[in-house]
Image (tube, rainbow, N blue to C red):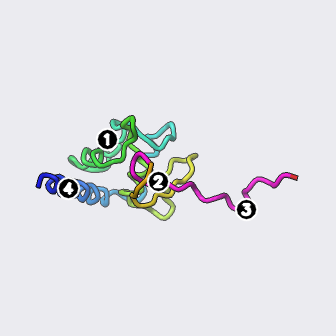
Amino acid sequence: TALGNVSSAAAGVERRVRRELAKVPAGALVEALNQADAARTGVLSQTSFLAVLQRLVPGGAAEMALQIADKNVGGAVDYVVFAAAYGKRSASDKAVPPGMPALQIESPATSSSPNGHRLRPPPPLPAAAAPPAPL
């Protein structure tokens, strides 16, 4: 059926993107995306996202990555989710721009999130870093 062909094509695109990004050194994807996000918003315009990926992966893989990347209502790419899903991570790597709280991404599920992922808030601060209790 036509739906089966679309589903198969989408799976092929995702496999190619994963294969090409697997060749990128650990942390390089996250670092490049973070550097492109001067405002530290966690999203990039499609043009900026594509420019970053074209520097990292050959051929049409960057365009394919743009096709499958989560986008917000305005069309900007949520690169934090993309890097968490497709980036090869190093031990110290975090797919979050400096100054932004870490989001813990659960698997796609029923959610009110515009990109279909359930996001949990970051864990509470350790007791030593918590503000003092009122007197």
Q: Which residue is mark 4?
A: 7
Q: CA distance from mark 1 to mark 2?
A: 17 Å
Label 2: which secondary element: loop
Give amino acid for label 4. Ser
Q: Which residue is mark 3?
A: 127
Foreground label between 2 and 3:
3
Label 3: which secondary element: helix
Give amino acid for label 1. Leu
Q: Is the residue marked by circle 1 packed among few (<14), some (14-19), or many (20+) residues within 10 Å?
A: some
Question: Percent position (x, y) of residue 83?
Answer: 40, 53
Q: Which residue is mark 1?
A: 50
Question: Percent position (x, y) of residue 132?
Answer: 80, 54
Q: Which residue is mark 2?
A: 95
Position of the N terminus by quadrant:
bottom left
Give amino acid for label 3. Ala
- Which is nearer the N-term, disc 2 or disc 3? 2
Q: Which residues are magenta?
A: 113-134
Label 4: which secondary element: helix
Query: Viewer-proximal residue, 12 or 90?
Result: 12
- Which is nearer the N-term, disc 3 or disc 4? 4
Foreground label between 3 and 1:
3
- Residue 117 is one of the magenta-drawn residues: yes
Foreground label between 4 and 2:
4
Q: CA distance from mark 3 to mark 4?
A: 48 Å
Q: Is residue 81 above or below residue 19?
A: above
Q: Is residue 117 visible?
A: yes
- Which is nearer the N-term, disc 3 or disc 1? 1
Q: Is the residue marked by circle 3 packed among few (<14), some (14-19), or many (20+) residues within 10 Å?
A: few
Question: Percent position (x, y) of residue 23?
Answer: 30, 59
- Residue 49 is one of the magenta-drawn residues: no
